[in-house]
Image (cartoon, grey):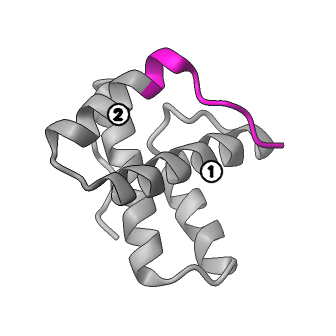
Amino acid sequence: MIKKINQQLLKKFDAQLLEKNFSSGSQNLFRKWLRYFLDFCFKYECDPKNTNSLPGFINKLREKKQSKQQQKQAYDAILIYYEILNIDKLVKSQ
């Protein structure tokens, strides 16, 4: 079930993408990865604010045969989400 991203969160996320000078195409992909991550957390009942949820999400992408580039893109998108929430990025780089 795909849920909409909270508008306040999306505005902050978009502002970060602009600040980091991502192209509009990349911005769309990063929004997609954030939505997929939030959907993953909802489906598997894990806390999206807990950095321990990110490795499970990346593993799921790997299982679904997403490329290394797509996995890295998703990882980077979620790091921006954590940055917005002021959550320490204690997750190992992919």
> Is the Cβ of the residue at disc 2 closer than 8 Å to that at disc 1?
no
Q: Which mark is residue 14?
A: 2
Q: Quadrant of residue 3?
A: top right
Using the rendered image of the protein, determine whether residue 88 is visible from the camera's viewpoint.
no
> Which secondary structure lies at badge 1?
helix
Residue at horizontal 53 percent and vertical 65 percent from the top: 58
Q: Is residue 38 above or below residue 93?
A: above
Residue at horizontal 22 percent and vertical 39 percent from the top: 18
Q: Is residue 11 above or below residue 29?
A: above
Q: Is residue 37 above or below residue 11?
A: below
Q: Please name the predominant secondary structure of the magenta segment in the image.
A: loop
Q: Would you say 71 lies left or right of 62 here?
A: left
* Residue 2 point in image, percent of width and height: 76, 42
Instruction: Provide the residue designation for mark 1.
Output: 36
Q: Is residue 30 above or below residue 17?
A: below
Q: Is residue 2 magenta-colored? A: yes
Q: CA distance from mark 2 to mark 1?
A: 16 Å
Residue at horizontal 49 percent and vertical 31 percent from the top: 49
Residue placed furthest toward the right: 1
Residue placed furthest toward the front: 24
Please state which amino acid type lies under the numbered disc 1.
Tyr
Q: Would you say 75 lies left or right of 33 here?
A: left
First in residue order: circle 2 vs circle 1: 2
Q: What span is colored magenta in the figure?
A: 1-10
- Which quarter of the rendering shows the N terminus? top right
- Which quarter of the rendering shows the C terminus? bottom left
**Number of numbered labels in the structure image:** 2
* Residue 48 point in image, percent of width and height: 56, 36
